[in-house]
Image (tube, rainbow, N blue to C red):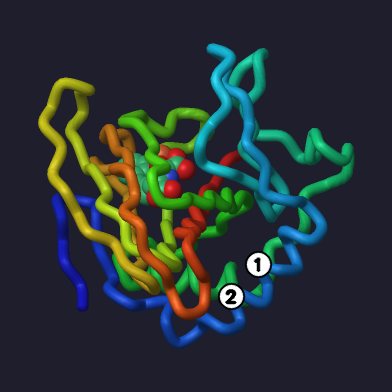
Amino acid sequence: WCEQLCTGAVVLRRFALAHEAAILTALDGITGAAPLRHMITPGGFRMSVAMTNCGRYGWVTDRTGYRYDTTDPASGKPWPGMPEVFLALAQAAASSAGFDGFTPDACLINRYEPGTRLSLHQDRNERDFDAPIVSVSLGIPAVFQFGGARREDKPMRVPLTHGDVVVWGGPARLRYHGVLPLKEATHPLVGHHRINLTFRKAA
Ligand code: MD3
Ligand code: FE
């Protein structure tokens, strides 16, 4: 149930499954208050992944750049709080991978539909690269691309399915990564979407 992809990257297969109902209920509350939306990149492109956030800080992008913000630009209000079930799951996963004391203050929620992809990138908007990132996959399957320290490094392909949790820390933290275009599929609870929760220490 636990695979090491490389130093710092640990896959916890189906780790979130026991809490799927509570997670999906909490997610409905968040998206009711802060709806999923397609943000605009600094280059002017509409992202095919729909996003929202919970927790103190939310990741946003618009024509002026990428940043973490304490307010939802769509409403001007603070992001919804991080549900207890989210926090407990992220902390338990981090501990299992050897990162005790992980205190995420940001949870980015990404929603993919069939055909949607996320091109290779690094996550560099956080202040503290020593803290890991915890990601939770829900819904239809995806193939994750895990590259190297340089964009040119050939990525490995990691299939991720409903309930899988990955902890990315240490030397894995700044590696390039992305998601290949999703295939058409349906999940009994989530429908024709993949939802990814990404827990970070932003500040
Ligand atoms: C590896 N999201 O939101 S989560 C992102 O599936 C993002 O929605 C993807 O990449 C998704 O930035 C991947 C897994 C992930 C997140 C951050 C990482 C893997 C990572 C940072 C460093 C290395
Ligand atoms: Fe990323």
Q: Quadrant of residue 15?
A: bottom left
Residue visible at 76% across and 40% down in the picture = 70
58, 157: nearer the viewer? 157
- Tell me whether the residue at label 2 lies in contact with that at label 1, contact meaning CB atoms closer than 8 angstroms: yes
77, 38: nearer the viewer? 38
Q: Quadrant of residue 146?
A: top left
201, 27: nearer the viewer? 27
Q: Which residue matches tag 2?
A: 23
Circle number at residue 113: none
Label 2 element class:
helix
Kind of residue sitting beneath label 1:
Leu
**Percent coordinates x, y for residue 14 in the rendering:** 33, 77
Residue visible at 49% across and 53% down in the picture = 198
Q: Which residue matches tag 1?
A: 27
**Percent coordinates x, y for residue 22 in the rendering:** 61, 82
Kind of residue sitting beneath label 2:
Ile
Residue visible at 41% across and 63% down in the picture = 137
The furthest residue to the right: 76
Seen in the picture, residue 111 relative to 68 is either above or below; the reply is below
Seen in the picture, residue 94 relative to 116 is either above or below; the reply is below
Label 2 environment density (alpha carbons within 10 Å; few <14, some 14–19, many ≥20)? some
